[in-house]
Amino acid sequence: MNTVGIDVGTSSVKVALVGEDDRVIATASRPLEVSRPKPGFSEQDPQHWWQALVEGLDELKAKHPSELADVVAIGLSGHMHGATLLDDKGEVLRPCILWNDVRSMAQCEALTAKWPGLHSVTGNLAMPGFTAPKLMWVREHEPEIFKRVAKVLLPKAYVRYRLCGLYIEEMSDASGTSWLDVGARDWSKAALDATGMRRDQMPDLVEGDAVSGELNAELTRRWGFKRAPVIAGGAGDNAAGAVGLGAIHAGDAFVSLGTSGVLWATTAAFAPAPARGVHAFCHAVPNTWHQMGVLLSAAGSLAWWSQVAGADEGKLLAEIDASRASSACWFAPYLNGERTPHNDAAVRGGFAGLDGSCTRADMTLSVLEGVAYAMRDAQEALASAGTKLSEADIIGGGARSPLWSQLMADVLGIPLHQVAESEIGCALGAARLARLAAGEPLSSLKRPARVRTFAPRADRVSLHTARHRHWQGLYAALSGWARA
């Protein structure tokens, strides 16, 4: 069967037309921009997601009309935590407050103090990136908008609403709101009460592999489908990436080097470990959960450095001598604060140890190392929660670089496997969930082909273990500096 996977990312909307055996027939992508109206603010206009999606599907219709016509199901993935606020007519009230927005630090502190059951119910610390503190901020700073909020949707749920007219969310994305009882897989009345919200303001919940609706008649005609495709519950971006990798069994793991960074481990039960900023969320498939360490700026750090250095990322990476063991300087990737293990929205990144001999290549390598060392922090946080990884797949835009992938394997000390179609992993995962919603069994999800393995090199593992310990001192210095 043919399916469509839609991934509403931070930097682009990707649409994948997928056939039998996960064969990617065609993809389309449209870029997105982030608005930063004030320091620490990060927003997007939901209409831009919709316009990008429409243009992407229009492109697939123009280039592959017959294959698109045979599509039976659509799956959705999206960046998590974003607060999309609608009034009682379904109109957007303000720009969506994104996952990397840090304005609600004070509200996180207030929620933690007010509700003792926070950690045991939601499985996580209160973090500015999560949705609930954002609504507390809106109530305090934009009270007239808050009074008009009829529904709060996450980004992909807003796209679903535009596709089929229903307010529905699934478990993996809902886990990142601080309103879900993650163990019970349902909205928590205590969480809603603690943040001044009501259940009727929440979308209905389904599992990621369940049918959540079907495409409306007008859009079915526009894109030439033979019949209205069903729409799967879908997944938050990381859970969708996991489904794309077949990481649906306890012990499965992956590293994601997207705009943000993730170290993921699938678990068979709800296993909260908030003390070191480990996330414990529902998976997008039933009766399954996961732990996750999160970096707020992974490949995003390299993208930032590319803009500052005035050269594209490929040129910067080509300047690095691949035989070099380490950089002559240091970098902390806290451009938007950090989650795991610090849960510190105020800390900011920086270079250190620069001298007159440092080159642009040194600084680029230090950016790659800094992200890898931050990922090792996440690895150690998961290990402290009882999750020790022996291997993992590696996905995301950063995984296109063999240099960075090998460095990451050396720093983490485990083999990392590059997989086919990793660049559209979230859209592929969404398409796979669509297939399940159309009737295929969970057992049909297979692992994609591993095209290359990066084995850790013993001498580099020892080197980076020592360098990581030294690098960890940057956090205390930069955190103190940010608060001075």
Image: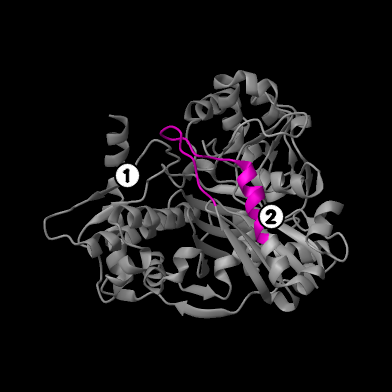
How many numbered circles does the render carry? 2
Residue in front for this viewpoint, 278 or 58: 58
**Image quarter (top left, top right, bottom left or bottom right) of the C terminus:** top left
Say if 376 sits above or below 442 in the image: above
Residue 92, position as x, y percentages in the image: 67, 34
**Magenta-highlighted residues:** 32-56
Residue contact at pointers 1 and 2, CB within 8 angstroms: no
Residue in front for this viewpoint, 61 or 227: 61
Tell me the residue that label 2 is attached to: 54
Residue 448, position as x, y percentages in the image: 62, 75
Say if 2 sits above or below 40 in the image: below
Say if 102 sits above or below 255 in the image: above
Residue 285, position as x, y percentages in the image: 73, 58
- Disc 1 to disc 2, C-alpha distance: 43 Å
In the rendered image, the residue lying farthest to the front is 62
Q: Nearer the viewer, mark 1 or mark 2?
A: 2
What is the quadrant of residue 265 in the picture? bottom right
Tell me the residue that label 1 is attached to: 475
Three-letter amino acid code of the residue under disc 1? Tyr
Residue 127, position as x, y percentages in the image: 52, 37
Q: Quick check: can you spot residue 142?
A: yes
Seen at 61% across and 29% down, the residue is 135
Seen at 64% across and 43% down, the residue is 47
- SS at badge 1: helix
| First reached walking from the N terminus: tag 1 or tag 2 | 2
Seen at 77% across and 52% down, the residue is 207
- Whether residue 44 is in magenta: the answer is yes
